[in-house]
Image (cartoon, rainbow, N blue to C red):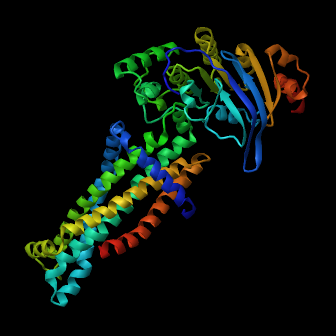
Amino acid sequence: MFENLGEMLIFFWRTVKMLPQVWRQRRKVMDQLFEIGNASLLMACVLSLFIGGVLALQTGPVLVDRGLSSVIGGIVGLSMCKELAPVMMAVLIAGRIGSAMAAEIGSMQVYQEIDALRTMNIDPISYLVLPRLVAISSALPLLVIFSILVGWIGGALVCVYNHNIGVSFHSYFANLRQTVELGDFINGLFKSWVFAVVIGIVSCHQGLLTAGGPRGIGLSVTKAVVNSLVLILILDYFLTRVLISI
Amino acid sequence: MTASSPTQYGVDVQVRGLQKSYAGQPVLQGIDLEVAAGEIFVIMGPSGSGKSVLLKHIAGLETPDAGEILIAGHPIKSAGSLNHYRLAMVFQSGALLNSLSVGENVGLYLSEHRIKPQAEIDRIVKQTLEQVGLKGIENRNPAEISGGMKKRVAIARALVTEPQLILYDEPTSELDPLIAVTITEEILRLKRQFSVTSMIVTHDRSLAFGVADRIAMISDGRILFVGLPGEVKANPNPMIQKFLTAKFDQEKERKTI
């Protein structure tokens, strides 16, 4: 993975240079957005609801024992905003969408569809990579906003209905509003945007490197997902370090 | 490749000292060829001899280790070279984009380069598909059509670019004899009508000797012989003769059993 980092950065730069052509590819961007939403919205909802719930369940009783029940909302709110929603949605999208991107571009590479594009003087980066990168980097932050909101609701439901916690909706959201600031929200959205670029670039790049038939496609999909996840977790640490100091 | 000029006429191709290796394994070992404008040039040889790799180099899909290719006098991959000629390639598998309909595949070049308005593209697509005997399949998906139809759609996709050089990779493989004849006729029609230069990689001896102006025999990445079809048939090189006369000996097989 790391030996390809330089290649991926060049690949990213070549895609960025194509950005002025994005309006021409708007139909493909919309198709990709629809695909991302369609494939991940329900899963994002279930995942976020339970993450928020588990967070409240793990922290709630301990805080209640220490007389700190009033801060549960803030803890769930901040954790979802700054860490859990961006990372978990990135993991979900890497698995569902990154793998699909690598498989689709990989099979196009193996079955000479990309060669056919090149002979028609159509740049595969502009035709295939640009719409996917624009779609994923727009969709993931939106999905993270959705995930944060659903996660908060999940946490609230557990706080209200779990008899070991017993915090009211009003108290939970009052503390959440007091603790979470717009900057925390933006912090999470920025992280998710970086993760989206990583997933898009790693998956499309891996797809274009595919060689050797169906086995090669399978290998590319695995590499795309694993490399995306490793990079997301490494970048998460460094981004957190940088964002904390701002 | 642009549609800068509406005229359609063949371009000449020169291949000089082309060499290519994959993982240290030489595939092309100094190929020299000259193809005249408007010529139908067939490249024949056994599997693994480097025919398709040579074609990919001419299409600009591979970078040679050494040597050069000139199309219409311009080195391929040099800046702006694609503005000097229009090239199209018909792949062995058809290489249609599965995410697009047949019509979108055929009109892809025109729509992506915004050469014509959509209504005009639709008309050209319909007309070109009719030309290759595939009327009314514009809205079908490539997955829903047969191998022979895919190949003809690929030819239609090449034709809409008004190419000056068409590269065919095994155009009649996996096709029944009737469709193979249709494709052979289409190749000849393009030469007759537009003097398009055609380079055909094939194993199909009847296609080769039916359409070729000249034939190149290739083996182990080297050109064995280039000449008129009659000269190739008369060439005493045992490798060429073996390739041209290979046939299944039913009697010998029966005796073995």
Describe residue A161's horizontal placement relative to residue A16 as left or right: left
**Res. A110 image quadrant:** top right
Number of marks drawn: 0
**Res. A18 image quadrant:** top left
Does residue A131 lie above or below B158 as drawn?
Answer: below
Describe residue A173's horizontal placement relative to residue B122 as left or right: left
Describe residue B176's horizontal placement relative to residue A183 as left or right: right
Q: Quadrant of the C terminus of chain B?
A: top right
Residue A221 shows up from this direction: no
Does residue B38 lie above or below A80 as drawn?
Answer: above
Q: Residue furthest top?
A: B192
Describe residue B44's horizontal placement relative to residue A176 as left or right: right
Q: Residue furthest bottom?
A: A66
Percent position (x, y) of residue A194? Answer: 37, 60
**Along the viewing direction, whichever of B103 and B68 lies nearer the viewer:** B68
Percent position (x, y) of residue A21? Answer: 38, 39
Percent position (x, y) of residue B233? Answer: 84, 17
Percent position (x, y) of residue A160? Answer: 13, 74
Q: Residue furthest left?
A: A170
Residue A152 shows up from this direction: yes
Q: Residue at x 47, y 14 (%)?
A: B130
**Along the viewing direction, whichever of B213 and B91 lies nearer the viewer:** B213
Q: Residue at x 34, y 53 (%)?
A: A137
**Res. B136 image quadrant:** top left
